Amino acid sequence: MPPSKPLRLLLSNDDGVLAPGLFALKIALEAAGHQVTVCAPDRPRSASGHAITLHKPLRLKQVPLADGSLAWAASGTPADCVALGLLEVLHGQTPDLVVSGINHGPNLGWDVTYSGTVSAAMEAVITGVPAIAVSVASYADDIHWDGAAHFVAHTLAPLAAAHGLPPATLLNVNAPDLPEGDLKGVRITTQGDRQYVDRLEKREDPVGRPYYWLKGRLHDKESLPGSDTRAVGDGYISVTPIQLDMTSHAFLRDLKGWAVERG
């Protein structure tokens, strides 16, 4: 069983400080007895990746959430928010864990390279703080947040804090959009293969000038067993360990055989 010790947590996201997923997760974390500080973007920053702000000032202000509590809203990206939260809002006092989410939409497979939600967690682990990214795999207006929120608050966050995570590694959680009682369980998974096709649509404005819309639909193919995409499609919460070391270690020996190295 997860330990009962309350945790000190920094909570962020990429959907914005007033997003319902963040609020649902905050309520669940506090109901589990944890101390939660919120530092999140002041507006939606979806698909911002791991961008940070270098050439203009960042601003912080406190805003009220739906329960009347105060959160910190930052003018920057999700990664900026975690940096500001750790260095300024918490005055350098390291939290037990950083949690990012709950994202409105999936962060499965290769989607993590675009995700501001996952990148907020990446920023935490770069500084040495363990982190969890959390998403519900649906873009519907009425989302079932409770299953993912309860699992993270009562099970995964305490376990991650108790056991620790390897350096530069985070946990990426995706849940189906199902009532908590309809979830089939939890699976430890690998990243799936999510490829998008028909990604660019060319249009014309009213005066005939071309413009472009990035969109895309998922490639219609079977997800591999053991992958996050398969688990979520089958009704399970997926938990995928993600590491920042993107070196293809399996290919290193072959690459050295190309005789590229000199000197």
Image (cartoon, helix red, strand yellow):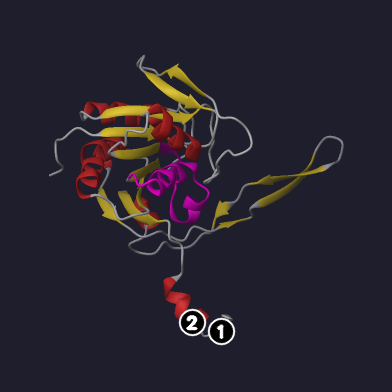
Where 161 falls versus 166 (above or below)?
above
Please tell me whether residue 175 is drawn above or below residue 81 in the rendered image.
below
| Left or right position of 14 against 162 | right
Quadrant for the C terminus in the image: bottom right
In the rendering, at what x and y percent does residue 167 appear?
33, 55
Instruction: Measuring from the top left, give residue 230's x and y in whole percent.
Output: 37, 57
Range of the magenta residues?
Answer: 102-129
Dot 1, crowdedness within 10 Å: few (<14), some or many (≥20)?
few
As for residue 137 lying within the magenta part, the answer is no
Q: Front-most of 210 and 177?
A: 210
Q: Quadrant of the N terminus?
A: top left
Do tag 2 and tag 1 residues touch (Cβ < 8 Å)?
Answer: yes
Q: Residue at label 1?
A: 258
Residue at 80% x, 37% y is 205
Can residue 144 be seen by looking at this rendering? no
List x then y, in percent, for residue 168.
Answer: 37, 54
Residue type indicated by callout 2: Asp
Residue at horizontal 36%, vertical 60%?
A: 190
All told, the count of numbered labels is 2
Q: Hey, which quadrant is residue 148 in on the image?
A: top left
| Residue hosting label 2 | 254
In the rendered view, tell whether residue 119 sits above or below residue 4.
below
CA–CA distance between discs 2 and 1? 7 Å
Work out whether residue 65 or residue 24 is closer to the camera in this orientation and state it.
65
Residue type pointed to by label 1: Trp
User: Is residue 103 part of the magenta span, yes or no?
Assistant: yes
